[in-house]
Structure formats: C-alpha cells, structure tokens
Image: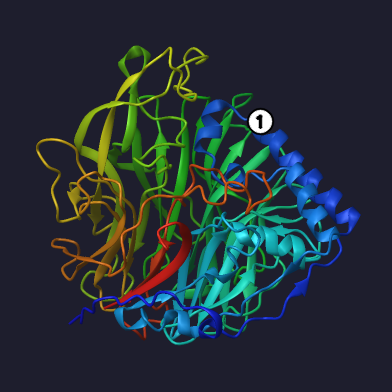
C-alpha cells in the first residue's frame, strides 16, 4: 500500500544553510597539446556529421547533441589561462531533506550550474538507473561535465555524469564527470545506460569517441559506483561510422553474459547488405565474461537508403537467457515498433511489427500525400523540443505466474490531432527525400497537423504473439479543442511481477505546455493500470538555458534537446520490491536537474 505525501519545498536556503562549500579552486593552466587535440576531435566530429545524409542527421542523436565548437574551447582555455577561480560546492544531503519522504531525491548537484555564469545554467537530463540492493547509481547527460572535465581533467572530455546512493535512493552523492580516461583524444558523449550484478559491481555504457573511431564505451565500478575504470570500447568502428543509442542488459541467469545493442549510422559505402547506399542498422555485441571482451557485431535489422532508417533499440532478458530486442523502423510512410529475440549462441529470429507508431507533435503533409513527423525532429512537441525515442521494453524474469511476459511501451499520437501552423518551410527539399524543414520564412507558410501523444502498451506471453495496443495513461484526449502530450515512457517489472511505467505528462495544463511526472502500476500483467502523479512541481520546457555554454558565448547543447529517455528499474538482485527511476526536472522552473523517485 503506497503512502502518499505532499511535497514540501524548502526555498531560500542560502549561506551556511547550504554548507559545506569547498574553498575556491584555481583552474589548472591549460596544456596546449590537450587543447589542440580537443579542438581537432570536435572539428573531426563536425566534419563527419556534415557528410551524413539528411535523413541520417535527423535520426542521429549523440554527436549532434553537444554543439561545443573549437572556438568555445579557445574561450575556455583563455579563462583558465587568466587564472579564473571557481568555487565547487560539495554535495549536501540537506538539499534532499524536504523531498525524501515523498520518495523523491535530488540526484545531480545543482550548486555548480551557475558557477560559470550569472544567467546561463547547465543541463542534466536523459537519465538511466541501476539498483542492486540498497545501492543505486544514476547516469545522466551533463553539459556541466564538459566544463568540469575540461578544467579539472587531464585526459579527454566527458558529457556524462553520475550520482550514487547507498540508502536505496533516499539521498544521492553527485560524483561529477565520468572518467574519460587519460587519452586526450577520448570523448564520452553521453547516452548513459546503467546495469549492475550486485551492490558493488556496476557497469556504465555510453557513446565513446576515441582517437581511432566511434565506439560504445563500457566503464566498470567495483565500489558501488563511486569510482570508475577508464572506458573501453565494447564495439569500435572507423570514422565512417557514427554509433548511437546504446542499450545494455545483463542476463539474470548468468551475470557474466552482457548484451549491448546500438544503432550504426554507416557512411562507409562498403556494407555487404547496402553497398554504396547509406545505411542504418540495429546491431548487437555479446560478452560472456562480464563485459571484459565482446564478440563481433550481429545485425538485428538494417535499412538501406536515405528515406528509411532504424533507431532506439532496447534489450532485456527473460529468466531462461532469451534476449528480446525492440526498436523503431522508419519506413517512407510510417514508423513501426518491431521486436525480435534470440537465445545464447543463436541468431535473432525474424522480427515482427508490434504496431505502427504515430509520432506526436507537428506532422507535415508533403508531396505524394505521405505523412512525416516534423522531420528536423528538433522541434517536435509544443515548447520546441524533440521527442524521438519514446520507446521501452521490459521482460518478466521473476519465475512467477507471468514469467516470460514481454512488455513494449511507446508514446503515440493516434488518438488526437488538430490543425497546426507549423511555422516551417520546405525550401530546398531534395526530391524523393523526407522533408528537410528549415527555420520559418515569412514568405512560405506551411500548414500541418499536431498529434497529441498518449502512452501505449502491447504485451506478449511468448514474445511472438502480441496483444492489441492499449492505452496506459488514464485521462482521455478531449473531443474538442487541443489535447495533451504524454511522452517518453519507461517500464520495469519488479521481483513480485508488478509492472510499472513512468512518463512526462501534460494532462493538467489546458494549454499543453507545463510538464508533470506520472507513473502507473499494474498488478495483473498489464490488464489494468492505476495512474498517480509524482509529487513534484510542474515545469515548463525551458531547455535552452545552457545554449551559451554557461556564459562563454558558444553553443553548449542543441537548443531543441531535453533528453530522449529516462530509465525505470527495480532491484536486480530481486531482494527488494518496488521501482526507482530518475528524470529531468526544472529547478526553480528554469534549470534542468535530475531527481529520482522510488515507489512501491
């Protein structure tokens, strides 16, 4: 039985109340070789990105999320050379006291977000959580980690942060930027995925640019997430590839077995399946020694050409070592939610389409009568932020009545749409390609349709035959006027077999702007759901606060970016029931931070 508490915010904590503060630290003098290597790496990434097809650039997330330029590096180096003094506040448990009784904990430490500027904040978002016993680790994308790793690191740069809890998620300690290793050519570029096998051993998977190619990096911790090894590539490809959206799962029946899926944006022109055409592929690499070594990639799905693609793969195990994989397949006229599975040592079975997803937000009617979502994918939902990866997968491996059940959830705009003046033009759109939308031109007005998203679910007892799609959020779209967005669901099954989903929700704002957090639980394998609101204040999608890289005058994070997913998890060891998931919340209504919510 859940006890619900009203959240009490403690405002105006200043001075000694927020103590202890670390004394001012002088920024180390910049190493010219390191500065030049960082600038060269950023220029290389930008050049490679510019060579992708328009459709690939729309679907790719990781390398376009961070807009840091070589010019910004010069300004950071100048600040360091000037001996700028920076205060760094140590994490204070007092920041969480007002919220922990409601099950909400502060994860990222917001105290340094304004250290570099009086008016620009820094963004923490796109979270993932792992829990083993009382030990919880949250990973998140962190634009502040770029600045921290630049000033205080000696190796490469990091866009990844982490925080650790040893009391079941009641309080967290922000450990700062993830270790990019000593190589100055390394760049950890986010998309975190956390897993664990026990309370001491955790694995952090993320995008990893090395001196020799594009990789999915894997870092390990043997002290509960407090310190991390140098990242190692689980898969490494040359610079004709961009790897994106990795997802990791550990087999509960054999914790030495680790699977990682990801998207390969392949511009090599040498793929056996696609030849000279551009290619996107969902691929899988497998480790049988706890993530120390991985085999060669296996192809789960690939699409050839510039008007199709695949993205957003998730992987999860059942209790018999069978792995299930779900992803999006982008076809010329629709987007499918697809699922496949494979046994250890086997090949993936032919995938099936669970359903056709209707993307939310602005959708344009283009030549040929085909619908495409607002395909710059940058200003999709109201408030001008992207919502590409609203998909998640969970498998029941409890050994109970519903053992083996597969659940797939996604956000979907099929239930409500209204006419919308999209405010974009189709200038310069290449023939026979999806619409490449450019900023508003007063000379060309393009009318479109806005699709309001709901949270959908399909489930299967055998991973092959899936139920008709049903709606999870309890509110219904209004018959008249506008609607409400519900987006980026995350799903988990706890050791009792209970299923939970959490997402961002706008049902309580008639104008569909302010965002809240909602969750739902099912005790009968997804047949019925009980919705409840996470007790935290609504916030507006004011996600451009670090566009100036905290006062240094250069782009820091893509201004349409608010994170593409948030994970929900339960105790991997099976000793504790209930769920915990981190998520983005706007502190003071404007500064993106990370919170965590535990519920039973």
In the structure shown, which secondary structural element does the residue marked by tag 1 occupy? Answer: helix
Residue 567 picture location, percent across and down: 41, 63
| Residue appearing at x 34%, y 24% in the figure | 364
Residue 99 picture location, percent across and down: 36, 78
> For residue 363, what is the image quadrant?
top left
| Residue appearing at x 75%, y 52% in the figure | 210
Looking at this view, is 112 or 147 the one in front? Answer: 112
* Farthest right residue in view: 32
> For residue 9, what is the image quadrant?
bottom left
Is residue 130 something one can see in this rendering?
yes
Residue 159 picture location, percent across and down: 63, 57
| Residue appearing at x 72%, y 58% in the figure | 157
Is residue 322 something one can see in this rendering?
no
Q: Which residue is mark 1?
A: 50
Q: Is residue 108 left or right of residue 227?
A: left
Q: Is residue 263 left or right of residue 26?
A: left
Which quadrant, please, contains the C terminus?
Answer: bottom left
Q: Is residue 119 left or right of residue 386?
A: right
Residue 458 picture location, percent across and down: 24, 51
Which quadrant, please, contains the N terminus?
Answer: bottom left
Looking at this view, is 238 or 301 the one in front? Answer: 238
Q: Is residue 489 left or right of residue 118?
A: left
Looking at this view, is 240 or 168 the one in front? Answer: 168
| Residue appearing at x 32%, y 83% in the figure | 101
**How many numbered marks are there?**
1
């Amino acid at each position: 039985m859940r006890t619900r508490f009203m959240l009490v915010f403690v405002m105006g904590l200043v001075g000694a109340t927020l103590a202890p503060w670390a004394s001012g630290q002088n920024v180390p003098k910049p190493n010219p070789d390191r500065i030049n290597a960082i600038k060269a790496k950023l220029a290389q990434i930008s050049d490679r990105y510019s060579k992708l097809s328009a459709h690939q650039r729309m679907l790719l997330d990781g390398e376009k999320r961070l807009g840091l330029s070589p010019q910004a590096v010069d300004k950071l180096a100048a600040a360091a050379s000037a001996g700028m003094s920076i205060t760094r506040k140590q994490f204070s448990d007092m920041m969480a006291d007002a919220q922990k009784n409601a099950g909400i904990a502060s994860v990222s430490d917001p105290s340094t977000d304004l250290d570099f500027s009086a008016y620009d904040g820094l963004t923490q978002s796109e979270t993932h959580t792992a829990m083993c016993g009382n030990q919880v680790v949250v990973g998140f994308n962190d634009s502040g980690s770029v600045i921290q790793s630049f000033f205080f690191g000696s190796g490469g740069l990091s866009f990844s942060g982490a925080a650790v809890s040893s009391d079941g998620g009641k309080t967290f300690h922000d450990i700062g930027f993830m270790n990019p290793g000593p190589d100055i050519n390394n760049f950890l570029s986010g998309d975190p995925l956390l897993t664990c096998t026990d309370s001491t051993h955790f694995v952090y998977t993320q995008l990893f640019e090395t001196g020799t190619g594009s990789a999915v990096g894997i870092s390990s911790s043997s002290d509960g997430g407090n310190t991390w090894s140098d990242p190692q590539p689980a898969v490494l490809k040359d610079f004709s590839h961009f790897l994106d959206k990795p997802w990791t799962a550990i087999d509960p029946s054999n914790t030495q077995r680790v699977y990682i899926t990801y998207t390969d944006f392949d511009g090599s022109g040498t793929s056996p399946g696609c030849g000279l055409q551009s290619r996107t592929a969902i691929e899988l690499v497998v480790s049988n020694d706890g993530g120390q070594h991985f085999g060669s990639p296996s192809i789960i799905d690939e699409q050839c050409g510039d008007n199709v693609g695949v993205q957003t793969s998730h992987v999860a195990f059942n209790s018999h070592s069978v792995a299930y994989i779900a992803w999006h397949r982008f076809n010329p006229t629709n987007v499918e939610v697809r699922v496949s599975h494979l046994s250890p040592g086997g090949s993936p079975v032919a995938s099936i389409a669970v359903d056709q997803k209707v993307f939310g937000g602005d959708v344009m009617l283009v030549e040929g009568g085909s619908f495409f979502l607002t395909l710059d994918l940058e200003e999709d939902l109201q408030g001008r932020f992207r919502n590409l990866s609203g998909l998640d997968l969970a498998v029941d491996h409890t050994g109970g009545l519903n053992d083996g059940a597969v659940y797939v959830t996604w956000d979907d705009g099929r239930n409500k749409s209204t006419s919308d003046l999209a405010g974009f033009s189709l200038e310069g759109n290449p023939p026979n390609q999806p619409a490449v939308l450019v900023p508003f031109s007063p000379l060309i007005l393009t009318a479109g349709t806005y699709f309001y998203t709901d949270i959908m679910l399909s489930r299967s007892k055998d991973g092959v035959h899936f139920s008709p799609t049903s709606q999870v959020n309890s509110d219904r779209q209004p018959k008249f006027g506008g609607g409400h967005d519900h987006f980026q669901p995350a799903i988990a099954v706890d050791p009792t077999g209970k299923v939970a989903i959490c997402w961002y929700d706008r049902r309580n704002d008639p104008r569909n702007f302010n965002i809240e957090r909602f969750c739902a639980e099912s005790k009968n394998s997804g047949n019925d759901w009980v919705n409840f609101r996470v007790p935290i204040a609504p916030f507006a999608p004011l996600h451009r606060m670090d566009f100036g890289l905290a006062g240094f005058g250069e782009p820091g994070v893509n201004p349409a970016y608010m994170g593409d997913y948030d994970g929900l998890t339960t105790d991997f060891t099976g000793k504790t029931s209930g769920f915990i998931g981190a998520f983005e919340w706007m502190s003071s209504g404007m500064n993106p931070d990370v919170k965590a919510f535990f519920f039973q």
